[in-house]
Structure formats: C-alpha cells, structure tokens
Amino acid sequence: MKIAFYSKNYFDGVGTVFDAKLIGICRFAHGRNRLVDQITYSGHHHPLASSLPPGLALAIPTTWVFSVPKMIPYNPILGDRYFVPPHNGLSHFIAGLCLVCLRVPYDSIPSSSPRREQLIAVMSQLKAQMDHYLENANLPHVMPAQLVNHPPRLAKDISNPYVSITSNMGNISSLLKNKTSSDGKEMIVEVADMVFGHRLPWKRILFHCWSLNSEMRLQVQASDVWDEATIHSYLSDVRQMMLAILDAPSLFIEKISPTTDDIHHQTSDHDRKLLPFPGDNFTRKIHHTSYNDIAIDPTDLAGRVVFISGAGSSLGCAAALACARAGATGLILTARTRSLDALENLENQINHECPEATVLKVAMDIRDADSIASAVSATRDTFGSIDTLLNVGGYVDATVKLTESDLEDWWTAMETNVRGSWAVTQSLLPLLKNSPSGVKWIVNYSSFTAHNTTSLCSGYGVSKLALLHLTEVLSVEFSSSPALSNINTVALFPGLVRSPMTLKSMPAALHDALIDTPELSAESMIWIVKERRDWLSGRFVSCTWDLAELAEKREEIKTKEMLKMNLKLCLDGRRRTASTFFARFHVPVQPFSLPRPTSTLPPSPYSPQSSSSPSVAKCSMFEFRRQPFRTLYMTYFITSTLLVRLPYWVITAIPPFLRPRKTWSFGRSIFVPGIRAFVSTWYATSFPPAPGADPETIANSPDAAPLGFVWVSPLPTDLISKEIGEMMKAQGVEAQKTFAYWYQREGVKSSKDRKSEPNEKIILHFHGGGYVQGSAHPKGGAIGPVSSGLLQHCHGVSRVFAGGYRVSSSAPFPSKNPWPAALLDGLACYYYLIHDMGFSASNVIVSGDSAGGHLALAIARYIGRGEHDGKGLPTPGALLLLSPTVEWGVTHTGKDSSMVRNRRTDYCGQFFQGYTQRSLLGSFPTSYAFTSQWISPASRQLPKDALENLFTGLPRKVYLLAGEAEICLDSYRTLKERLVGDLGEECVKYNEVSDATHDFITMPWHEPERTEALRDIGAWIDSL
C-alpha cells in the first residue's frame, strides 16, 4: 500500500513536527502486516518513510465521521480525498469537537439551559470561524473546485449515507484558548452532554478503513445491527475522550475505535489489515494520564515497605512518590551512583509531602552482584522485610538495525533488563518471604516491544520478552510453594513515556509519540499492588488500559489464561503461536474439547499425543444455564434421547460385540451411556440443587432429628497448620461450622446423645460429586446407597457418620469455597467424632467415594504429618478409598491411557474438563493442580521432594477400591504404588474390580461387582 499526501503546506521544512504528531495521534501497533511500503507527497519520497520501523501501519484519523441520516450538517468537503491534519494536535481535536457540536440544530439546545445564549454564541463563533477558514484556506488542487465555496449549513435533508466531516481547519484552537477555565470546561461538558445525550434513532456505526486509489480514508457505514444503547455507549466513550483532552491540553487525541471483536465479524480480511492489534483496545477506554478510577488513597499501601530499583529514573521517581502518597511506611530507593543526586531531590520531596515515610537511599547497580548484596543488607538492617519489589531499572539500546547495532550496547540491554531484574528478585526473595503482609508483589517494568515483532528492537524488545517470561515463571514457581504462594508477579507496560532514555534511543520523528505520563504508570501500579488481585499474577498489564474495565474481565482473563504468552496446538496439529502478545487476547485454542450436545460416544477430552505436561481441555460449559435456553435445551435433550439416543443404545446393546464391553450385561450397556448423557446436561445448564444443600433449612425443619442432622463446630484454629493457614489466607477461606448426618443399621439403637459405645467402630464417610455438587443428605445423591451398603455388609460397624463439606464453584457462577475449604470441614467432622462424641481414633475409619475419597486421603495426610498428634488430631484407625479422584490435574494421558481406553465405559469424563479444577484452585494458577500434593497426590508431575514420604503418616490399614473400566484407573494404580512404597505392601489392600465403572459401589444395579466389593470391604473392616 502507498499513502500519498496532497497538502504540501504542512511538509515545509522537512515536516518532522507533523510527522511526530501524526504518529502520536495514531499510535497504531507494528508488525502484524507490512502495510506501508512507500510514503510520498507531491511525487517525492517523504522523509517519514526512512524514520519508520518496517511494518508500521498508519491510519490517520483526521476526519470525524458519523452517519446519522437526516441529522448531519452539510459538509463542504465531500469527496474521496483524505487530508492531513494541521500540525497542532490540540487544534485538530478542538476542530473535531466543534464540528460535532455543529451537528445539533440550534433549536435543539434546551431552553431551560442557563447557558443557552452563551452556547448559541459559541456555536455561532465556531461556525463563523469555520466559514472564514474555508474561504481563505489554501485547499489542495485536487479538491473538487465546486465544493470549495460551499459554507456549512444545518440541513435535515441529507440522505447520503457516507458523509465525512473534515477537521482540517487551522487556528481553531485560538477560539477556545481562554475557554479552558472551570466555567469554559463546564460549558463544553454541557455541549457534550447535549450532543451525546440527545436521543436519536441511532443505527450501528461501523468503522471501515480501506485503501482506495492508493489513498486511505475513514468512513462510516450505517447498519441496522446495533441498537440505540450500543451507540450511546460508544458515544459515551467519545465524550470521555473529549473531557480528558480538555483536562490535559498537552495531549493530542486519544484513539477512538470500536472493539476488535465488533469489527472482525463485519469486515473482510483485507479490512482487518488496517485495524489496530487486539491489545490496543483490550479495554474500550484508553488513557494517557491519570484518571479517577486509579486515584491514590493515603491508605492504599499503609504499613507497606517498597523496594524500588532504578528510582532515579522518571518512572522510578513517579513510582516512589506514588508509594509515599499511598501511605507506604518504608521506601528503599536505589540508583546508580551518578543518579544519587536525583534520589536526594526525591527524598526531599517525599519528606516534605509524606514525613511519616522512612526513606533509605542506596547506591546500587543491578548489574553488579556486590552492589545488590550491599543494598539488600542495608534493607534487612533497616526494615527486616519488604512487601513490594518494583524492578524499574532498565536500559534501552540504540534503536537501529541488527547490522548497525553494537554488541556491547546490545548486551548491556540484556544484562540490565534480564540479568539485573533476575538478580535483584533472587536476592530480595527472602525479605519478601519474611514479610507478615498478606499482599506481596513483584512488579517488573516491561514494554510493548516484548510483544510486537518489529525491527530496530533486537536488544530491548528481546530483553523485555525475556522479562515477561520470567514474570510468568516466577508466578508458577511461587504458586507451587505454599511459603511463597502469597507473592504475586506482574509485568507492567508503563506506556510511551518521554524520558531522557527514550529520547536518546528513539528516532527524533517518534519523540512526539511519547505522550503517556509517568504518573499514569505510578498510579496504575498502586492500583494493582494495593490488593492481592491473584487473577493478574504472572500476566502483562498495560497502564494505558482502563483498569476498572480490566477488573470487570477478571473471570474471563483467569479462565481463558489471557494476558500471557503461550504456544497452543490447533486441532489439525498445526502450531499456533502467539508470536505477538495480542494474539493471546482471544480464546485460546485447546487440544480436544467435547462438542455440545454430547453424543453417545463422546471423544476423549485428552489428546492421544498429549505431552508430559498436559492441560485440562476447556470447552464451553453451562451455556444454556439461563432461561429460556435452559428449557429449550432440556426439551431438545429429552426429545433426542427418547427418539435417537435410547433406540441407539438399545440396538447396540443387543449384540455383545457392540456393547462398550462384551462382558457387560444388556442393562449396564444402556445405563452407563445414559448416565453419561445425563451428566452432560449438568454441564450444559447447571448442577441440580442437591437435597440438603442449605443446612440452615434442614436444621430449622422438623425433619432434622429424624434425618440424623447435626451441626459440627469449626476446626479449632490451633489445629490449623502453617501451610494450610497460608493457603486459607491466599484463598480468603475461613474455618466455619459444618454439618453431618448420622446413618445407622436398622434395628440398632444408640444413645440419645449419639455418643460412642464402648469400643465402637464408626465410618466417617464423605460423599462424591466432583467437589461441585452432591450432599451428605440421605437423598443427596450416592451417599444413601453407599451408607446402606456399608452397614449391610460391614458387620463390625453399626453407624456411619456422613460429613458435610462446602462445595466449590467458579465462573460462570460465583467463585466460592476453593481449597482448602473442604479440608477444613472434613477435619472438623473428624475432630467432632473424637472430642464431642468420644470415639477412639483407632476405631474411626475415614472413608470417601470419588471426590470424597480424595478428601478422605487429604484428611489422613494432614493428620498423618504429625504436626498435631496428641493435640487433638490423632491418627485414625483405617482409611477406606472408594474410586478416589486423586488427580484433578490429569497427567496420565496418551492413546493407551485409561482416560482414552475407558472413555466408553465411564460416565464422569466431563468432571475432568476443568470446572472442578478451576473451582478448587481459586486464586492459585492452573499449574498448581499438577504439582500440588493436595490437589493431585497421584500426579506424575509432583516434584521429587514432594514424593518423599508422601504417605508415610497414613493409617497402617488402607483399602483402595478401583473399577477396571474407569477412566481414572491409571491414577489409582499410581496411588497404589506410592502407598505401598511408603507404608509397605502388608498395609495396603488394593481391589481392582474387573468391568466395574467409576464409583460402582454407589450403584445398586451394578451387580454382582458391587455386592462382592462390599463383602470384601466388610471382611477387611472386621479384621481391623
């Protein structure tokens, strides 16, 4: 593409001033497609071309374009030409503002307005100035002559759907030069309110950028797709932009564009080439200076100690001042020796504004290990610990091509930006770890060049990309360590800030693109670090984004793993890489997602070619949770099941060779796929409310006593270990009272207070349900058949105590009860049996099926670590695990794995598609599910040190029941090996039942396997 300029007036004297303003106004991203091949004016090569990085795409927003039939003033410059703006960026903006005001007929000004006459006078002045300009302007010779002398007029008979309102006017800014006072701004605000609040039959405005006759123009096309509310929302953003400019006249003009998603589904591939990168408008509002939503409060960082490297830079100074104003009690300001004078001035300013803050100045070169050690030692001696680390110090190498760059200069950028930040972080990590604060942050100052593949940045851009990856790595590493899990990391793009460093390194033609203020980055940083904001940990944040709007996207950012750099595989096996950061703003392509609706034989959610570090496949879930879609979906499901699925199941179940297993009965061959299809409706709509899900309702009903309902007090705080306590703090979880139900064999009577009989054995059982549904209520699911079966066949046990626990949830539902909420409730139930009911720990059999089995194992592990032995949590007598789901971060994958091999003979595959994992993890990253002993004790990715003595403290008697037809079979076998390795083969009884599906012990129709397994369990319990 070629861009030709026709007005030579603004290119006199090489035109560097205009060039810079042009880039400052546009600020479109580099690198996606090379759109600008040549820039010319009057037939000559323009100097701007040589100063542009290759691949810089320019779109010049010099015209304000609206398309509202019969409501647009007549435009005297209709035609195909696209004109350059005046070199004064503010006058360009004011011109556009004035013309927007002129869109409204004079008689539409409210008669009740106290400034009605003043408004009319101002608009008349604007109109007169525009007339004067049009009469005297030296218009390009290519402009159709017949349009030059047409003055603007307010007309309602314009039917042309493509009308461009030019803002190519000069000297307009002088008209409002004195109108930026408080009164003047209020007047303009009222004009804007009148313009954008005026209710008109708006239609959708769709921006189209395209090339025509080697020129670029911006036009608007009317469409019937958008509704009035959408248009008003868009125009509200325009109004906010106007007010921002009036508040900060030194700025140029904020970029206005609809969201990328709005445009992509309406435009052609060619049109998309001219659109900004998705990251440019990740939030609809873009800022270049401070704004109300990130305004600093003096209590934001109350009591915090902040360490700042590179505090002598403009960004470092702004960050230090912001921290002091936010209430930080300690500030460690570091800089190279030659910048200490700047620190002296900074300290004086802080002492003047915030005398309560303690300031420690230290000379530190982040490339010198001894210098870093000295700074850390001084920090330790003065403050003892820190709460926040700001890695601001950096270096920009020369912005030149690789062939012209200097190796020493290039290496300085790498040493400073990567090695320096790494060394400072490593050295200060012990001080961060020792901080008692629950909010700890490491902020790495990065750059958008980390994501934009552009030339001239082979040093700085590469170093910032490495720093971004370091940010992600540290987040993953910290999250897998309970002692460090409350430390968050973030890579911060401060914007295009004018500083001595950027002015020295960037070409002169780009200097006026540096329009973002240091205060914007400082206040954005305070907004991030004042709270935990785990959803941002390990991610990249641009300070130019509207952070309030960003916070509204937190669930989407977290669940879709956005704002990160990742390599993803497409379904066809081709690699799709986020070679630019912005590609990751869209929903990532996942390896195999189950389709909707579920067919009779759903494909495996795991790729046969999965690597050793698989991720849980994500697919759409709960998309029909709202009415009327829920009813429509259920109608479809019932109809299609009766007419299609059921006949298919019956036909394929008749001949044994078509059954999921030849050895299965006719009934089982129908029941299992039927259950699988039924479970799919939960994940398409929502989980059905379980009976007893609200214990308060049960407790206040007359059925409480007959049902055996009891309240269980919270676990005493002195029995909560340091590790679990740190998890609770990180997750926002507290120990709460829970509930339970008593089950007893028919004909057996117990005391009124239900306390233990002499030497009585009891089973403490926890129900399944993937931690996201189910209840301990007798009618709450599988708990009834399990309890009745155990009581029928275990003659040495006459009662079962079914412990209730908090079920978890996550997006699209409210996020609540992440791990370790269920663990705390389970431990409270165990404590209740020992201390309130008087049972001997050696007579308690901790049991659970499916997710309940996972919880039972976690309870036994917690107790078995010996931290509280003799203080209230003695080791139970035995552990009974019935199809325990011990791997929520699935690592047993591959074409020969049970996940693939047994997918037709199991029904719970959707429980492993990520919802339970996300709900348990809460604020922890996905990687924690694969490396945590608590979430996935059977994971193949547990660190070696985590495997040492993993189950050593468990009861000396463990029974593990597994179905040979389960998708989790491989994890059971791994669990069995680890149990035997720590306890000895004589302590572990492993019963793998042939042809049995998941949790078959809960299914009365799963015979004879169920009865045989219950008899074996009964004999094992009687032998204890």
Image (cartoon, grey):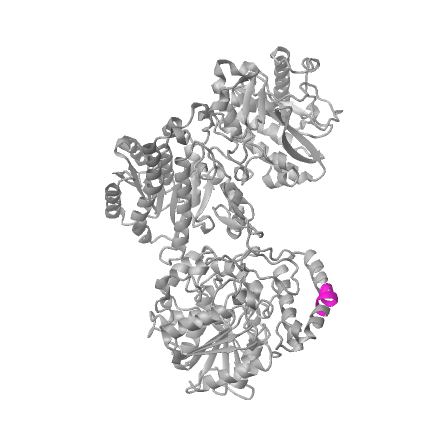
**Residue 526 visible, this orientation:** no
Q: Position of residue 978 (x, y in %)?
A: 40, 71
**Residue 152 visible, this orientation:** yes
Image check: 139 left or right of 831? right
**623 or 525: which is nearer to us?**
623
Residue at horizontal 40%, vertical 32%? 402
Instruction: Pick the quarter of the image with the C terminus.
Output: bottom left
**86 or 834: which is nearer to us?**
86
The residue stretch that appears in magenta = 639-646
Q: Is residue 774 above or below residue 207?
A: below
Q: Residue 783 falls in which quadrant of the image? A: bottom right
Q: Position of residue 425 (x, y in %)?
A: 33, 46
Q: Position of residue 143 (x, y in %)?
A: 65, 16
Residue at horizontal 66%, vertical 30%? 220
**880 or 567: which is nearer to us?**
567
**1002 or 441: which is nearer to us?**
1002
Residue at the bottom extreme of this rendering = 747
Q: Is residue 522 above or below residue 13?
A: below
Q: Main secondary structure of the magenta part?
A: helix
Q: Position of residue 1023 (x, y in %)?
A: 43, 86
Residue at horizontal 60%, vertical 41%? 261
Q: Is residue 870 magenta?
A: no
Total residue callouts: 0
Q: Residue 284 falls in which quadrant of the image? A: top right
Q: Is residue 620 above or below residue 208?
A: below
Residue at horizontal 54%, vertical 65%? 899
Q: Is residue 645 magenta?
A: yes
Instruction: Pick the quarter of the image with the N terminus.
Output: top right
